[in-house]
Amino acid sequence: MIKKISLSLLGIILLLIVVFALGHRFIVPKLIPLSDLPEPLGFYPIGTQIFEWTDPARNEWFTEQENDKRRIVVQIWYPSEPSNEAPLPYLPYPDRWLPALSDILELPQFLFNHLIEIDTHSTLNAKPNQDIKQAPLVIFSHGIYGFRFQNTAQFEALASRGYIVISADHAYDASLTFFEDGSIADFRSGYEGELTEEEFWALRNPQLSTRVADIRFMLDTIENKQNAGKTVWSVIDLERIGIFGHSYGGATGIVAAGEDKRIDAVVALDGWILPILPVVIEKGVQKPFFYIGRESWPDPLNYQKLNTLLHNSSQQSTLYLPGTMHFDFSDTPLFSPAMQAVGLAGAIPADELARLLENNIVTFFDTHLSHKSII
């Protein structure tokens, strides 16, 4: 998306009136109940690990600092051995993340303070499952203002079924990225006012190229780690690779799949098609391609370009979900029923929507990555 999401103003006003009238310290936990992510349906327990990788071949596009090489924070989810350790909390660095989420969603921070109580079903640094020998790899790319763990429910659904999933913060495109040395990559992917067509492409072309290069760098790094015999990477089958992404991440996946022969199938979740160059639209996606999204976008041109892309694609399928909104295709609806009141979620109940998306994504990758999910 080009700008921040426009929320339901009436819903926000009504919610805030109730909260402040009754006292938010007491009413928020009851008004906005938060729960852990849905229980994964697959057979395997889930492990996760977090890394910071630097690409020595690329200068950072978003900064003007000399010799500033591109850095990304990468997280991987995988089938693990059972563990007695506590699961990883959903929100890392809550003292810094909560103000950022408040700014991203344009809502008061106290509405999100209880996110610190949400746990995932993933255990940090758990031992990889010894029965997994050749697992397909699925890459995820977030949207503008997004972050690497924004679709954790889907990552855990895949990992519990025998997949390995990897996701990165596209630094400066993500809302926040925290590096090991204490530095932060803040959000720098937006703009103020209206852009001419020339200004739009001058901004988005290098951004999208940077994102696609991140995907290529991740795959190159995994190959190098495999050659070095690194444990968690050794079971990945690099002959079976899928990619999926939300919003700008959908565009990233489409372009990456066209440029990198290693990627076999692509899913776009309410994908933002506008920043894809016309030459790519005309070429189409010549690999299995699945678009899942809303019935319509605020800017009709987005789906006009999508329709041309689909027409020119060789193996495409679509699923348009009535009553959904942009953030429905991330973890956001799962946090609270109040997400509907403030315009961040649509009409489909969160758990029902989560299972619907999970089943469609898993089935698509099972089919096109020749994998039999274990439940």
Image: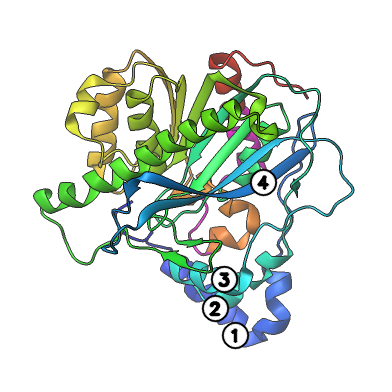
Where does the image place residue 273, in percent across and percent down from the top left?
A: 30, 38
Query: In x, y percent, where is residue 313?
Result: 31, 17
Query: How many residues crowd around disc 3 within 10 Å: few (fewer than 14), some, or many (20 or more)?
Result: many
Q: Is residue 107 above or below residue 320?
A: below
> Residue 345 magenta-drawn?
yes
Q: Hey, what amino acid is under mark 2?
A: Leu
- The residues bearing labels 3 and 2 have C-alpha atoms spaced at a distance of 18 Å
Viewer-side residue, 78 vs 330 = 78
Please give the range of residues in magenta.
342-359
Q: To which residue does mark 4 refer? A: 49
Q: Give the amino acid at mark 1.
A: Phe
User: What's the residue type where badge 3 is placed?
Assistant: Leu
Of mark 3 and mark 4, the one earlier in the sequence is: 4
Question: Would you name the residue on which mark 3 appears?
Answer: 98
Residue at image coords 60%, 69%:
112
Q: Residue at x 46, y 21 (%)?
A: 265
Q: Secondary structure at mark 2?
A: helix
Badge 1 element: helix
Residue placed under numbered mark 1 in the picture = 20
Mark 3 against mark 4, which lies toward the viewer?
4
Residue to which mark 2 is pinned: 16
Whether residue 269 can be seen here: no
